[in-house]
Image (cartoon, rainbow, N blue to C red):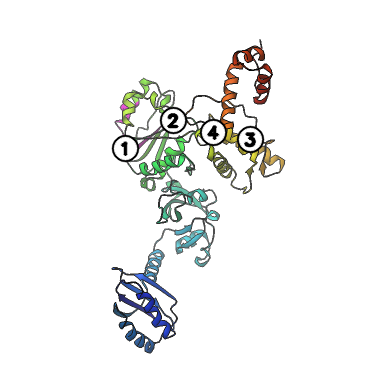
Amino acid sequence: MRVEITCANRVGILHEIMEIFGEYRINVTSGELGGDSGDKVYLLAPGMLSTQYQSIERSLYRVPGVQRVRRITLLPLERRYFELDTLLRHVTDPILSVDREGRVVAANLAAARVFGVSLDRVPGMQLQRFLPLMQVAELLRDFSVPRYGLQAVVRGQNFYLNWSPIALGENPSGVDSMAGAVLRLQAREKSAFIPQPLRAMALWDFDLRRQSCLQLRDLAALTAPLLIAGERGTGKSTFASAVHYLSPSAARAGCIRIVPCEGRFVLPTHLHATGTLILEDVHHLSQKAQIGLRRQLRELPAGVRLVATCGDVHTLAPALAQVFSSLAITLPPLRKMRPALERFATTLLRQEYPELDALDLDESVQDLIRRHDWPENFHGLRDYLMAAAAHCRRRGTCRIDRQDVPELIPQTLLPWRNWGRGLTYREIMEQLERAVLGDLAASRLSTRELAKELGISHTTVANKLRKYGLSMQKK
């Protein structure tokens, strides 16, 4: 039996109500508080008889503040569950809810049919089992990842995947604020897939990159042209692609990526009225070519979102810079994120070798990676790790150590703002000393000449050169 009690909101009233059920030895198995006005108590007592209810009803009315007692057919939570279940059963698209670990919590009948299992077996299964090529772990880790129009293949069927995050109320924008997500798969014929410019990737929002990811999430749904700036290898193309996938238009519109060809951009003669147009590396164009591009952009349909990537914003012609003067994101280089380099490296390995769960880095390799400046940023780090992983796998081990990694030739370019972030004082001074000695040794003939200029003994100079692997100029 289910009972609804309308009562005043005062301290102790719920305790008095439950005492009455205890006196009659009625077991209450579940309950809810709330209602439209916040003045309702809902209780479920499966074993209560009608005669017992009549006695309890009289006792409840004697409690100060109780205004109304009545029997109901369903608790509000039960009603919402049955209504939602009925709605989902009639939805033809597969819909499922997953927790933060990627386990399916609930799914509708359409999802079970697509997965090829019975409906009662779906809860508890890992989503990665059905989407082996998707970055499920990163997708469910945070908000700053692709959300709309993701291409997915499940048992040979083609889908667009859209997902809505489930946030914890205490900190809805925090790094660990996701409780899970609701995913919807929309079926598409294979020929109906719109070619996408890049693979939809998680953005790895670690350290300083976190702020860039949050900024991108806020700007993705807007319509003004967006410029993404940064050094080579910082992830400009990935962020540009994410602009499309973070926008609701991705579920119904396509995306075109164009790179410079012979010093200019060749825009398509016919563009769809909506979608995303990505222009890669506009800084490679001459000033004249940029002015010509500006004229072409005036002919774009109003519904096309313009996104451009650029290495150095100061190389843009004034006419083109004005187009992107409203919205811009600058990505931090790896040398400013040394505390997170180990996480970036581990994530790269997991992405490139998803079939291997135990590929990890020795502490000496982690220290080597953290000390290096990575002028090519993620490009250089990825190639470095892939070479090390290949050597490690040939040895038949799952731990990358110093014998697996290629030799690094440190080239510390100074001054860089915040370049020493994440290093100890001793490590910072060693980096500085290496850079100073390297520059001076290149133009000196002997350690004695260099020692005289620095005001230290030639033995000290020789020891330091040996320590850093430097040598004097030879003529």
- Mark sitting earlier along the chain (1/4): 1
The residue that label 2 is drawn on is 259
The tag on residue 155 is: none
Front residue of 168/460: it is 460
| Rendered view: 135 above or below 300 | below
The residue that label 3 is drawn on is 387
Left or right placement of residue 328 versus residue 335 in this view: left
Q: Amino acid at mark 4?
A: His
Mark 3: which secondary structure?
helix
Q: Gap between marks 2 and 4, in whole Å?
A: 18 Å
- Mark sitting earlier along the chain (2/1): 1
Say if residue 446 shows up in the picture. Answer: no
- Residue 37 in percent (x, y) is at 28, 68
Mark 4: which secondary structure?
helix
| Rendered view: 12 above or below 146 | below
Left or right placement of residue 453 versus residue 241 in this view: right
Seen from this angle, which residue lies furthest right? 395
The residue that label 1 is drawn on is 224
Q: Residue at x 36, y 46 (%)?
A: 249
The N terminus is located in which quarter? bottom left
Q: Amino acid at mark 2?
A: Val
- Mark sitting earlier along the chain (2/4): 2
The C terminus is located in which quarter? top right
The residue that label 4 is drawn on is 379
Q: Gap between marks 1 and 4, in whole Å?
A: 29 Å
Magenta span covers which residues? 293-309
Mark 2 or mark 4, whichever is nearer to me? 4
